[in-house]
Image: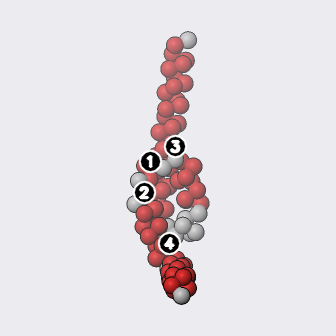
Amino acid sequence: MNKNIIIAGAIAIGFYILSQPKKITAIAQKVAQKEDISKLPVQRLRYMIAHAAALKKTPKEVAALRAEEARRVVAWKAAVRKATAQKIGKK
């Protein structure tokens, strides 16, 4: 008798947890929004920009992602130019 009550309780808890997916996804999105985009890899930024609608990003968030990607691309190009100039200067 007690065994059946435990099984019924476990099934009820399982149904309750499975009926709450919206809350779980909302929590995951809030955590994702709090990510520091300056620490994300450029590939991840580009993915997020390309899939902004699927990730439910607002236009302001997309603009911030694009600005961060552009800033990093400019910084990378400057670093490459500097390294190239140093190599040419040493020859």
- Asked whether the viewer can see residue 32, the reply is yes
In this rendering, the answer to whether 37 lies above or below 54 is above
User: Residue lying farthest front?
Assistant: 1
Residue drawn where x is 57% and y is 49% of the image: 43
Q: CA distance from mark 4 to mark 3?
A: 32 Å
Reply above or below: 44 against 81.
below
Helix or strand or loop: what does disc 3 sit on? Answer: helix
Nearest to the observer: residue 89 or residue 3: 3
In the rendering, which numbered label is found on residue 25?
A: 4
Q: Which mark is residue 70?
A: none
Residue that mark 3 sits on: 73
Q: Earlier in the sequence, mark 4 or mark 1?
A: 4
Helix, strand or loop at disc 2? loop
Q: Earlier in the sequence, mark 2 or mark 4?
A: 4
Q: CA distance from mark 1 to mark 3?
A: 14 Å
The disc labelled 2 sits on which kind of residue?
Glu
Residue identifier under label 2? 35
Q: In the rendered structure, find residue 39 and report the number of the disc placed on it.
A: 1
Relative image position of residue 80 (x, y in whole percent): 53, 31
